[in-house]
Image (spheres, rainbow, N blue to C red):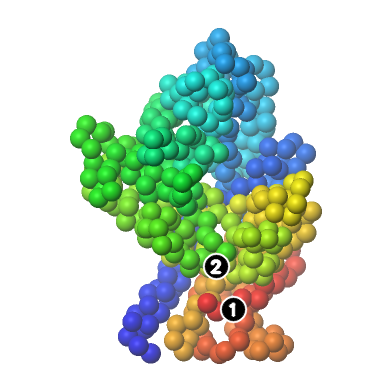
Amino acid sequence: MPRRLLLALLALLALVAPASASASSRQVMTFEAPTQLLDDGAREATLDEIQGFGVSQVRALVYWRDFSARERSRKPPRFDRSDDTAYPAGTWDRLDRLVDSIQRRQMTIQLTLTGPVPKWATKKKRGYVRDPSAKEFGKWAHAVATRYGDRVDLWSIWNEPNHPDFLGPQYRKGKPHTPRVYRKLYQAGESAIHGVDADDRVLFGETAPIGNENVVSPLGFLRGAMCLNERYKKEPGCARLRIDGYAHHAYTRKSGPTFVSEDSDEVSIGSLSRLVHALDAAARARAIARNRPIYLTEFGIQSKPDPLAGVSFRRQAEYLAISEHIAYANPRVAAFSQYLLFDDKPRKGPRLQRFSGFETGLRTSKGGKKAAYDGFILPLAVKQYGANDVLWGRVRPAAGATQVTIQTSLRGARWKRLTVIDTTGVYGFKTPHADRQRYRAKWKRPDGRTITGPPIRPY
């Protein structure tokens, strides 16, 4: 085996050696099911399912417009908007019930405070995303933090602020406009939250992965919001930001998790090193503190029936496992995530319009389980290195020592047992490579039911 392949193989195996148990506890898995978690009729069953996966943290978007007052009016409500008890009766009910349920279950929740915003909170009092008032946002963030701060210790400011659906206008006179708008929003929100509880963590970014004429690229957005030029030199007089982590949505393209965009300012799961280097450069410029962790707070693989970006159900399961392994192997990544449980419901119109939402769920929109459902319980990624395949996997619900069986099938033959592995959750090993060989994991749950993961090919 060439020396470079041998070194790569040894490095990969080091990630799944006995120390992998501590690495597993280091990285948190977050689940997002926005429609179901804020639905009183679906919330508890959804949380049951999420906990059944072995996941104990969820993320919820808190839309300012939805948890406010007089949201369609040009005139602001006449009460103290930093006081959560001053809001109209019922304002917080849905979020109250979700947070209460999370607390009862001894789970944790990340709240992302974001637009769309009340019309009265915009600069020109029209629309719901254009130039929100940082001062008003700070008041609202204080109200939310006061209400939930004793039960929530992980927050983030704004969902995809580099996307026009959430913050605009993205560009003004051909130059990125939203980075400086976001900086003010972040400073107001961070100050309000830490004013309630100085120990809470507040995440910066929540950026979308691409850039174009409508969307500011994530690294271009990062530089603009941190007052950095293209060479990561900080403008004089621009204060250092307190950020407790950088949140990013590292979605990839149809070609899979190893895709790397030609645009060096885009960041997908296959180019996470770009974000690591950008954060390190920002720290050297004294724009932020050093060694800020990365939280991949939203991620999924788009599947069929999306006719443009969707992959097959089996390919979705493979890509999810590969992506999770990429995240797991990066020591700066503190959290990975799954978005969604159910695919979005089809919309009216022709096929392209009907499936223009997210088909990233582990279930179809009608509730059927995809291959990724059991694949999420038993993720398995297989990478070929020279004459060997290196397998990385986990038993997500494992609460202690357990055994997982790895099976193999060669050229479509019957499945045979390759090995049985003792694990507390994460495992890895190497085996000789063979053409057209596939692998799968089998695990017997404590209740006696056997879960069989989908077939996985080396990549």
Give the farthest residue toward the front.
173
Q: Quadrant of residue 370?
A: bottom right
Other-residue count near label 1 (Cα within 10 Å), few / some / many at <14 / 14–19 / ≥20? some
Where residue 14 appears, as percent x and y from the top left, is 40, 73
The residues tagged by marks 1 and 2 sit, at their Cα atoms, a distance apart of 15 Å
Q: Is residue 28 left or right of residue 237?
A: right
The residue positioned 57% from the left and 16% from the top of the image is 74
The residue positioned 52% from the left and 17% from the top of the image is 81
Other-residue count near label 2 (Cα within 10 Å), few / some / many at <14 / 14–19 / ≥20? few
| Amino acid type, mark 2 | Ser
The residue positioned 20% from the left and 35% from the top of the image is 236
Q: Are marks 1 and 2 in contact (CB under 8 Å)?
A: no
- SS of the residue at dot 1? loop
Give the farthest residue toward the top.
78
Q: Quick check: 242 above or below 48?
A: above
Q: Is residue 193 left or right of residue 50?
A: left
Q: Quadrant of residue 417?
A: bottom right
Residue 245 visible to the viewer: no
Q: Is residue 236 left or right of residue 72?
A: left
Where residue 12 appears, as percent x and y from the top left, is 42, 74
| Amino acid type, mark 1 | Arg
Q: Which residue is mark 1?
A: 457
Where residue 93 appears, as percent x and y from the top left, is 67, 27
The residue positioned 47% from the left and 22% from the top of the image is 123
Q: Earlier in the sequence, mark 1 or mark 2?
A: 2
Residue 212: which disc?
A: none
156, 180: nearer the viewer:
180
Q: Which residue is mark 2?
A: 255
Where residue 274 appears, as percent x and y from the top left, is 36, 58
- SS of the residue at dot 2? loop
